[in-house]
Image (cartoon, rainbow, N blue to C red):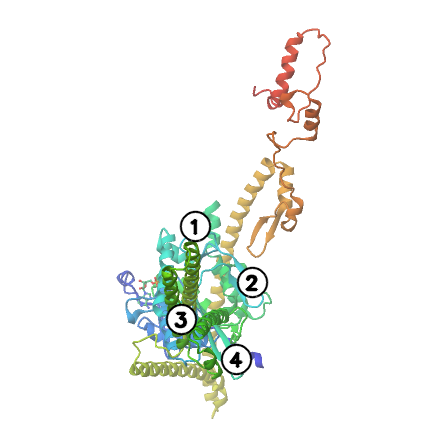
Amino acid sequence: MSKSKSSETVKVVVRCRPLNRKEESNGPAGSIVQMDLRLGQVILRNPRAPASEPQKTFTFDAVYDANSKQRDLYDESVRPLIDSVLAGFNGTIFAYGQTGTGKTYTMQGVWMDPEKRGVIPNAFDHIFTHISRSQSDKQYLVRASYLEIYREEIRDLLNPNHANARALELRENPETGVYVRDLTSCVCKSIKEIEEVMNVGNQARAVGATDMNEHSSRSHALFLITVECSQPGPDGRKHIRVGRLNLVDLAGSERQAKTGVQGERLKEATKINLSLSALGNVISALADGRSSHVPYRDSKLTRLLQDSLGGNAKTVMVATLGPAPQHYDETLTTLRYANRAKNIQNQPRVNEDPKDALLREFQKEIARLRAQLNHRKWRNKQKKEQVDGEGWERDEDGETEGEEDEEVEKEAEEYVKLEEQRLEREKDAIREDQFLLAEEKQRLLGEKERMMGDLRKEQEATEQLTAKYKAMESKLLVGGKNIIDHTNEQQKMLEIKRQEIAEQTRTEREMQQQMLVQDEETLELRETFTSLQQEVEAKTKKLKKLYAKLQCIKAEIRDVNDDHVTSRQELEQTQNELTRELKFKYLIIENFIPPEEKNKIMNRLTFDPEEDQWKFQPLVPAESKSLQMKKRPTSAVGYKRPISQYARVAIAMGTHSRYRAENIMFLELDMTRPSTASPDHLISFSYWLISNPAQHQNPSIG
Ligand code: ADP
Ligand code: MG
């Protein structure tokens, strides 16, 4: 029971963009999408079907038509999610849909126009406004990362040389789940800073692409925000909650044409939408509820979003549609996809005191720096008091603990100043002292000089420590401090009112939807019949209704079947092409690589499931490297290179000096007189053999 209490479904909202100029000029066909905002329904008309065919109706958590405002979508559907993230839940928003239907418009919008700012800038506002208005005993740390997945490779958009950098790897931690190794994450202290991060990433995205439109429609962009909040609990200790927010702008969902391409292009094409089709499979498996295996591991995207789909997260999916008749098929696919996602159950919970909270480390580091700094200052202060001769009295007052930091700091600075003056005075005194010998004077002056140097070094170190401490502390945001100055009371009230209205609209819609369902169920219970005739009429009516429904469902089954057939054909075609490619590779391997080389290579290959790649095992196991790999002998004095035992013996025997460092056997010649060739000729031939062994093996070269 407790499990079902904490579980909730993925919220799915649908948004349709207005017809654009080109589509309007195409003809009077108009929009094929109708929306019932009150009921949260989308009604889709098939432009090719006869008018008698029933239209398709889908119900969602909310729908937004062409006239919808960015603000409305945010307040109604996104705000509650961001509030949860601020309370320590994981949250994900992803935009799904065909290219050109408004995914990027919904997620980012037009930054310069306050009316058209999308989910991401509004979320920035929301998060930092929340922090500035929270109580002063709360400390926050906000971090942001930005990455994209393109052709199944993860690229860090905040790393300036990301275009040349190696693709990042995914790693799994049993406690915190899947994460991207070495991903840049920037601590952000204000809206301006986090917007800057977004800008940098967007620019990096555009730079890497030759054709931005093409690129953005084929890559997934993930903006990740981590909000850590520390607050004293009832037990007096500080507790940390970590909320992670994924803002995902997916690649265009349209079918990529895979047919007719080969080789590298084919591999590319199969990779481009791998993440998206894997996402579809994950959603299907989860929505089905019966399949035991959810193929998260099939793609980078699904692994990264594992928690958001069926795990520890609250998720909102925004499916975007285009209203033009020529996109009917894609629109229908999107609606089906979205409809399936509605059934996914998540189990969100607050992330309380996770081990990897950076905030805790920051707090510890700040405390350590502070202690160091205080120690230094106290030491200086103490010295000053001793110099002043008042140290003992003050300490006995027991006042030391409660004294203000600032006072300590002031006194410490004063001490340094006084000490410097004192040293100067003493130096002057030494210089003027008539009774000291010149040597003695020099020595004493040198000593004072050294003391001055020490004092300065000490002071510099303190200054550095202070700077480090301040930099560290400024990264933590403290609630109650006004980091946003544009918020006055009126605005605050307005915002609250707007939120209330959004909340009301939401509950109203939910009630309407529930009523609709209940109506259908209870209709027959309420009906009483006075006559047989009436009963027949009522039942006929009902039959007609049910028949229409049946037709709808039959049509749906047909559609889905057709859909499956097409995608199966496509898959088969891809498979055929891949098989052909494979056969080609086999041909090369079998005919052009010597079998023993092939075996050597095969024995060294292992599959790395983490990276989904075949890898070469190192020739020598890593841990025993030092044992097995003998150190290469350094050349001994007088020899050009390491030599063999044979050569050493040869040297000792004092044989032919020219070859004594080589591994060449020097055989005595058989001096018996030959019958045909002259001995001179033979001798020179054997020399030739020894000095040109390579040519000997392959005489045709010579
Ligand atoms: P996608 O990211 O899905 O490929 P875009 O967000 O780039 O699509 O949108 C394509 C075009 O449609 C853009 O010019 C955008 O301004 C416009 N557009 C999308 N949605 C809306 C909307 N709800 N209202 C007005 N214009 C929109
Ligand atoms: Mg886009």
Nearer to us in this view, 691 or 474:
474
According to the picture, the residue beneath numbered tag 3 turns out to be: 415
Extreme-bottom residue of the structure: 530
Mark before the other along the chain sequence, 4 or 1: 1
Image quadrant where one finds the N terminus: bottom right
Residue 271 or residue 646, whichever sits in front: 646
Of callouts 1 and 2, which one flags the residue occurring earlier in the amino acid sequence? 1
**What is the spatial separation of the Cα atoms under label 1 and label 2, in whole angstroms?**
25 Å
- Residue type indicated by callout 3: Tyr
Query: Label 4 amino acid?
Result: Arg
Q: 174 or 308, which lies in front? A: 174
Residue 172 disc label: 2
Disc 4 + disc 3, Cβ < 8 Å: no
Residue behind label 2 places its C-beta within 8 angstroms of ligand 2? no
Q: Nearer the viewer, mark 2 or mark 4?
A: 4
Q: For the residue marked with disc 2, what is the amino acid?
A: Glu
Residue 680 position in % (x across, y down): 64, 9
Q: Is residue 159 above or below residue 174?
A: above
Q: CA distance from mark 4 to mark 3?
A: 37 Å
Q: Which residue is mark 1?
A: 164
Q: Residues within 10 Å of mark 2 (few under 14, many from 20)?
A: some
Which amino acid type corresponds to the residue marked 1 in the rendered image? Asn
Q: Which residue is mark 4?
A: 237
Question: Is label 1's Cβ within 8 Å of ligand 2?
Answer: no
Which of the labelled discs sits on residue 528, or is there none? none
Q: CA distance from mark 3 to mark 2?
A: 54 Å
The residue drawn where x is 57% and y is 68% is 175
Q: CA distance from mark 4 to mark 1?
A: 46 Å
**In which image quadrant can residue 682 be found?**
top right
